[in-house]
Amino acid sequence: QAVFKHHWVLRCSVINKCLHSHLVEQNSSDFSAIDEYKPLDATTNPSLILAAAQMPAYQKLVDDAVAYGKKLGGSEEEQIKNASDKLFVLFGAEILKRIPGRVSTEVDARLSFDKEGMIQRARRLIDLYKEVGVGKDRILIKLSSTWEGIQAGRVLEAEYGIHCNMTLLFSFAQAVACAEAGVTLISPFVGRILDWYVANGDKKTYEPSEDPGVKSVTKIYNYYKKFGYKTIVMGASFRNTGQIKALTGCDYLTISPKLLAELSKEHVKLTPTLSVKEAQACDLEKIHLDEKAFRWHHNEDQMAVEKLSDGIRRFAADAVKLERMLKERMFSTENGK
């Protein structure tokens, strides 16, 4: 997915009506989509990389990652892990040739409850980017918004100057903890929140202003702006253009090429629905969450508990699929293929 400075997206007439501070990020590992929409930033995840790695256009990147893994040697598992990390970085580096901003690269979701493991893997990814001439100022490291992930983000930001994008964020408790940790950016998942309410409630359709995902991001945005947190709020995982338009004024939005295409065809006058001025006037109260309070408040949100665990499992499953594909590439040739 990609981030656009709004005045660049000349064909997206709806987005052009948004605030000048509004940014749009495109969610894609498809270079052609990035070339078409010219975003400011871009983000990838294991699912997107898995899909792109199976496209003929990107086989050179896969081949290079495989060669890198084999060159470093070690056990079969180590070679596959190194190839996988390298593939993420090669995709990220190619994306950065096409955008002026930053790319988000995700730490293995299987480390979501391993603070030190996430820190180590994030630093490894930054080192791999450095090897191909990309500085850490152009990278956002994506971490799952578990308590361990949030604390890993705190350490990476404060001690190593590595900027973090906290993903799989569904609860207000997660958002508060991320703000207190001083991470660069959060990605609350608008569409997946809606999915849960549609699947588990009687109501199957929502007006954008009543959409539970939209309401969640609105509350987070207002809280951050009211209390002066610098962490960027980037709405993610949209299901329709109504959700996007209901969150105009948000710091960033990460939008798929499909929804960007739909937006480009719409011609309506928009006024920003979110603003710092209105946020500062809201009646939210500031709270502090230590680990015990975080775990309790997050656990009280059934939707967030289920969607966070589901998201981790899904990203982990795609990481496993990607590794299987790399394993076949790396070791099938030794079997005469």
Image (cartoon, rainbow, N blue to C red):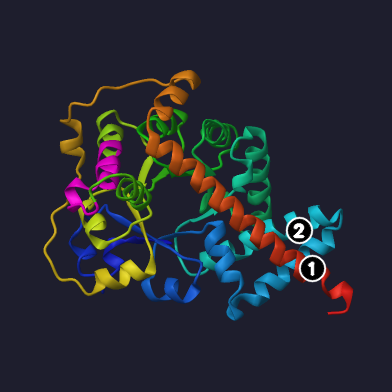
Q: Which mark is residue 80?
A: 2
User: Where on the picture, by quarter, is residue 305?
Assistant: top left
Q: Residue furthest front?
A: 202
Q: Residue at x 68, y 40 (%)?
A: 120
Q: Are marks 1 and 2 in contact (CB under 8 Å)?
A: yes
Does 33 appear above or below 110?
below
Residue 132 visible in rendering: no
Mark 2 residue crowding within 10 angstroms, few (<14) / some (14–19) / many (20+): many
Q: Residue at x 40, y 38 (%)?
A: 304
Viewer-closest of 269 and 244: 244
Q: Is residue 249 magenta?
A: no
Quadrant of the image occupied by residue 20: bottom left
SS of the residue at dot 1? helix
| Residue 330: mark | 1
Amino acid on which the number 1 mark rests in the picture = Met
The boundaries of the magenta stretch are: 204-220
**Label at residue 93:** none
Query: Residue 133, how many percent across, how many down?
Result: 64, 60
Q: Quadrant of residue 41?
A: bottom left
Left or right: residue 79 compared with residue 257:
right
Q: Position of residue 92 (x, y in %)?
A: 56, 62
Residue 257 is left or right of residue 79, and the answer is left
- Amino acid carrying label 2: it is Ile
| 33 versus 133 height, above or below | below
